[in-house]
Amino acid sequence: MKKLYSSVLRTFKGGVHPPDEKRHTADIAIQDFMDPKGDMVFPMLQHLGAPCRPVVKKGDFVLRDQVIGEPDGLGALVYSSVSGTVKDVKPMPHPNGSKVMSVVIENDRQYTTMEKDIQPCSYKELSAEQILDRIRRAGIVGMGGAGFPTHIKLSPPPDKKIDHIILNASECEPYLTSDYRVMLEDSWRVVNGLRIVLSLFPGAKGYIAIESNKPDAFQALQPYIEDENDIELVGLKTKYPQGGEKQLIHAVTHREVPSGGLPADIGCIVINVDTSVAISRAITQARPLQRRIVTVTGDCVKNPGNYRVRIGTSFREVLEAAGGVTKEPAKIICGGPMMGMALSSLDVPVIKTSSCLLVFSDSKAYLPEESACIRCGKCIQACPMHLQPYELNQLVLRRDWDGFIKWHGPECIECGSCSYICPAKRHLTQTCKLGRQVVAAMRKQAAKGGKSHG
Ligand code: SF4
Ligand code: SF4
């Protein structure tokens, strides 16, 4: 039998070991919640880039799988996941905390589907251009959280020689188990999506990188790659943030993404597990991206689990599908506890990048008081980007933006490792986040007005 992975687990320098808390949902099979009753909300921003332009108007009748938003630049098509009538096209609350132009559809719960103008087929019947076009037309984005349009990621400039396609199967954030369940329950599609991407880059090798705390996922995927010479399983140490793009690439290839650069600059492309499934569905079923798996968990949730939901469904309905709450929630997070976004309301929709809904009571959401730094250096040891979180914290508090840039603050990936490890409970990640936002805004302003930052 082919040796599937080395016993030596790979990793990166730095990181932390928070309790993984996956036991609440890891063994629960994916359940369908595909018939939501309420209005569906489709934000025109579900990707990295500019919001899409709505292409339907109030009163229109739309079908499932119909395009309702088109990008004008960097972006991805938005599809309706239901049939029904457009109630409104207006700014609506978005999981990112702002209001975003959205198409609101009254779901008729018939799920009448638009007739396809492409047919399901094997990727082997298509040219590289046709595969990329199908991925573009399916509106696929990085579903691990970043939301980068996949057809653009898979179209690097011709001078970038891609030799590593890495499937990010680490799912390192505590509580999240949606990718894990997909690997167990949809193993063929996970591998098929990777095969499709590999077909675009002749000579490249595929790597499925899984943390050591998911031995069942190794076993589930093994039969599908046994006869593949160009796909290898890579065992990773269980450590956070092992699934960070730069950390993952380093662990698998020992290459470093240059500052301000992209993985393609060093011959790598990273795709997420659910994204791989979406790529497979776009080709073999000719279906656009209009559903995803969401882990619903936290100490307030009555029936924690992994739910297959239509994009556009409100988180309120998703939580109700999980039995609602057993006690008063104090904090609701979209995503994991380390990098997720706090929600001020459950009345926001599941979007393409929503992997998890966390509902915590006071005891879990408690944010301890900051105290003075004791110069222990733990934040520096933990930082996977080799930054000095304490220094960056002080620079932001002094509003020294030039200093923040000089100390490489914009390189922070907002992973939360420094805040997690700090014995003084300094709000290190929050200040880095603020510093990065200010610097990004200054740079944008400078680019517009030709003025330099500072
Ligand atoms: S400084 Fe940024 S990258 Fe480094 S540990 Fe803190 S949040 Fe993570
Ligand atoms: S971990 Fe906290 S206490 Fe230790 S050096 Fe960093 S900021 Fe200071």
Image (cartoon, rainbow, N blue to C red):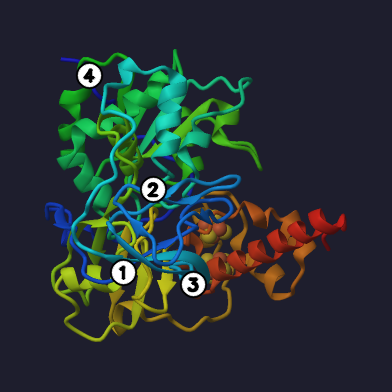
User: According to the image, label 4 marks what residue?
Assistant: 3
Q: Quadrant of ligand 2?
A: bottom right
Residue linked to disc 1: 314
- Residue hosting label 3: 97
Taking the image as shown, residue 245 lies to the left or right of residue 355, namely right
**Real-space CA distance between mark 3 and mark 2, rounded to the nearest whole angstrom:** 19 Å
212 vs 399, nearest the viewer: 399
Residue 319 placement, left or right of 438 = left
Going from N to C along the chain, the mark reached first, 1 or 2, is: 2
Decide which of 259, 28 is in the foreground and name it: 28
CA separation in Å, label 1 and label 4 = 45 Å
Tell me the kind of residue under disc 1.
Ser
Looking at the rendered structure, the secondary structure element under dot 4 is: loop
Residue 143's tag is: 2
* Whole-number angstrom distance, CA of label 1 to CA of label 2: 18 Å
Relative to 75, is 355 above or below? below
Q: Nearer the viewer, mark 4 or mark 2?
A: 2
Residue 69, x across and y down, in percent: 47, 52
